[in-house]
Amino acid sequence: MENVIFTRPEACHAQEVKTLVDESEQLDSNSLYIIYLIWCSFFSQNSAIAIKNNEVISFVTGFRKPDDPETYFLWQTAAKKRHGVANLGLNLILYAVEKEIENGIKAIEASVNKNNTPIVMLMKTLNKRVGGNLSTTSLFSSEQLSHEGMQHHEETLMRIEIN
């Protein structure tokens, strides 16, 4: 990928990551401090950003589950619209996942809206790339996620067992 650098995020990238989330039509936005500054500072070893022309054009945040450290949980990912880099999202996730595989993970999980076709297809492609076994279960119901009159979709857990 010409002129694109994959690296770990730092606190200085938090605002650009939040902007990508805010511009996304699929992601729930969070507080700059509570999530993105903390994420880019304390969870950077499990996350990644793509930089092109000194601009963050994509990110993936993830973490090792505290009760199951052999499972890598992909939390959020987004890319700038019209970034001009083929397969950017998949390649950035593969970059992050391959580091985690090198460090002993046995599974990859992601919470997804089952109607978000791009992320569902991305997880299926990731499953093929890592040679895993993909399963899908309900994670959180719409009732659990809805509050103050705001309806939220059900979240599905997609899990890839790595062989």
Image (tube, rainbow, N blue to C red):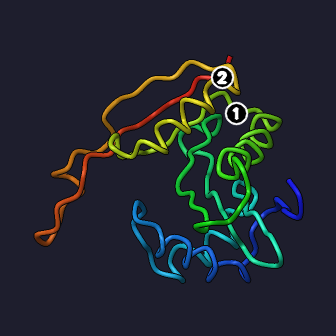
The percent position of residue 84, horizontal first and vertical second, equals 71, 61
Residues at badges 2 and 1 in contact (C-beta under 8 Å)? yes
Residue receiving disc 1:
105
The percent position of residue 153, horizontal first and vertical second, equals 24, 51
Q: Residue at x 82, y 61 (%)?
A: 7
The percent position of residue 150, horizontal first and vertical second, equals 16, 68
Quadrant of image for the C terminus: top right
Q: CA distance from mark 2 to mark 1?
A: 8 Å
How packed mark 2 is, by other alpha carbons closer than 10 Å (few <14, some 14-19, many 20 or more), is some
Q: Residue at x 83, y 35 (%)?
A: 102
Determine the image quadrant of residue 73.
top right
Which mark, residue 37? none
> Which amino acid type is shown beneath numbered disc 2?
Ile
Q: Nearer the viewer, residue 121 or 21?
A: 121
The percent position of residue 43, horizontal first and vertical second, equals 67, 62
Residue receiving disc 2:
162
Label located before the other in sequence (2 or 1): 1
Determine the image quadrant of residue 61.
bottom right
Give the structural element (helix, strand or loop) at label 1.
loop
Q: Nearer the viewer, residue 142 or 4?
A: 4
Q: Residue at x 55, y 79 (%)?
A: 19
Q: Residue at x 22, y 45 (%)?
A: 141
Q: Residue furthest left?
A: 149
From the viewer's perspective, is the residue at label 2 or at label 1 nearer? 2
